[in-house]
Image: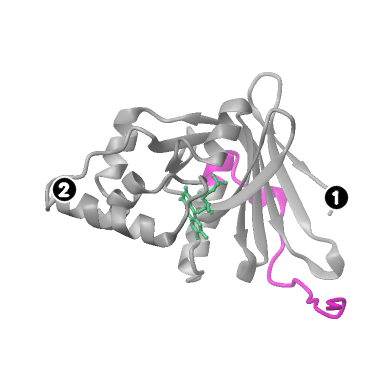
């Protein structure tokens, strides 16, 4: 299929250095809020890229569940492919796509497990079905059939019969501690605006404009 005619101009907005917050997390918060206010579907979904120690890359969608001064938190299975790669190589990249606003935010950083207490606190807020799903799915492993999973779910429901579902040991959160955040706004003639925060040698944020 030839897709060469599938194109559009990006004209909604521009990005000036003077408009950017000194703190990139506050800037992220502003854009995240605008993505929510615009009614975008799944504004918290982002692409998470990881790589093995030998550089084999993988990328998948996960959901952002918390962000604050310390970084970006998502939850997953600690035995999954992504977790194996993070254990080998904690350098990760994340990409938030807010395309109806002609925006993306590209972040690089280092992922580390959050405390068990923090994970338990979040696990307790999940719907019961998701809590049970975390117990029965050996995420990223080859399985013989879907029926196997459904059988395990039924067994787990009977065993726990309405009781509290404890958090599985192999489940929890990661925090991505950012070392660069690039805010991208589409512009006409492909002359997009790209403003990137990166940490300098003293650990202070430096804001730079990148060529599109
Ligand atoms: C919209 C969306 C949200 C998702 N959110 C999560 C999530 O928060 N955590 C997670 O482990 N997987 C999530 N997934 C599934 C992952 O994309 C992926 O299939 C799974 O984590 C296994 O990835 P891995 O084998 O690379 O570790 C989500 C998928 C989609 C499409």
Q: Residue furthest left?
A: 162
The picture places residue 152, in percent across and down from the top left corner, at 30, 52
Q: Residue at x 60, y 29 (%)?
A: 90
- Looking at the rendered structure, the secondary structure element under dot 1 is loop
Q: Is residue 119 left or right of residue 182?
A: left
Q: Residue at x 73, y 47 (%)?
A: 195
Magenta residues span 1-27
User: Could you say which is closer to the camera, residue 164 or residue 175?
Assistant: 164
Q: Determine whether label 1 and label 2 are within 8 Å by CB.
A: no
Q: Residue at x 22, y 39 (%)?
A: 166
Q: Which callout, 1 or 2, points at the residue further toward the start of the chain? A: 2
Q: Residues within 10 Å of mark 1 (few under 14, many from 20)?
A: few
Q: Residues within 10 Å of mark 2 (few under 14, many from 20)?
A: few
Q: Magenta stretch: residue 25 in it?
A: yes
User: Could you say which is closer to the camera, residue 35 or residue 121?
Assistant: 121
User: Would you say the magenta stretch is mainly helix, strand or loop?
Assistant: loop
State whether residue 172 appears in this view.
yes
Residue designated by label 2: 159
The picture places residue 135, in percent across and down from the top left corner, at 32, 44
16 w.r.t. 118: above or below: below
Residue designated by label 1: 211
- Which mark lies nearer to you, 1 or 2? 2
């Amino acid at each position: 299929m030839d897709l060469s005619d599938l194109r559009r101009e990006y004209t909604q907005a521009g990005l000036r250095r003077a408009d950017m917050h000194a703190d990139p997390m506050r800037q992220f918060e502003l854009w995240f809020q605008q993505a929510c206010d615009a009614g975008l579907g799944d504004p918290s979904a982002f692409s998470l890229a990881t790589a093995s120690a030998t550089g084999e890359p993988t990328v998948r969608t996960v959901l952002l569940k918390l962000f604050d001064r310390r970084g970006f938190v998502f939850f997953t299975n600690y035995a999954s492919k992504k977790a194996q790669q993070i254990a080998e190589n904690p350098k990760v990249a994340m990409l938030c796509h807010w395309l109806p606003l002609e925006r993306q935010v590209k972040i690089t950083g280092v992922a580390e497990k959050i405390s068990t207490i923090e994970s338990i606190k979040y696990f307790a807020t999940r719907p019961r079905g998701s809590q049970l799903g975390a117990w029965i799915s050996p995420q990223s492993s080859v399985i013989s059939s879907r029926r196997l999973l459904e059988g395990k779910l039924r067994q787990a429901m009977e065993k726990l019969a309405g009781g509290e579902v404890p958090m599985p040991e192999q489940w929890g959160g990661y925090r991505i501690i950012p070392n660069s955040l690039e805010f991208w706004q589409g512009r006409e003639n492909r002359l997009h605006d790209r403003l990137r925060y990166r940490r300098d040698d003293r650990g202070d944020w430096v804001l730079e404009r990148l060529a599109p």
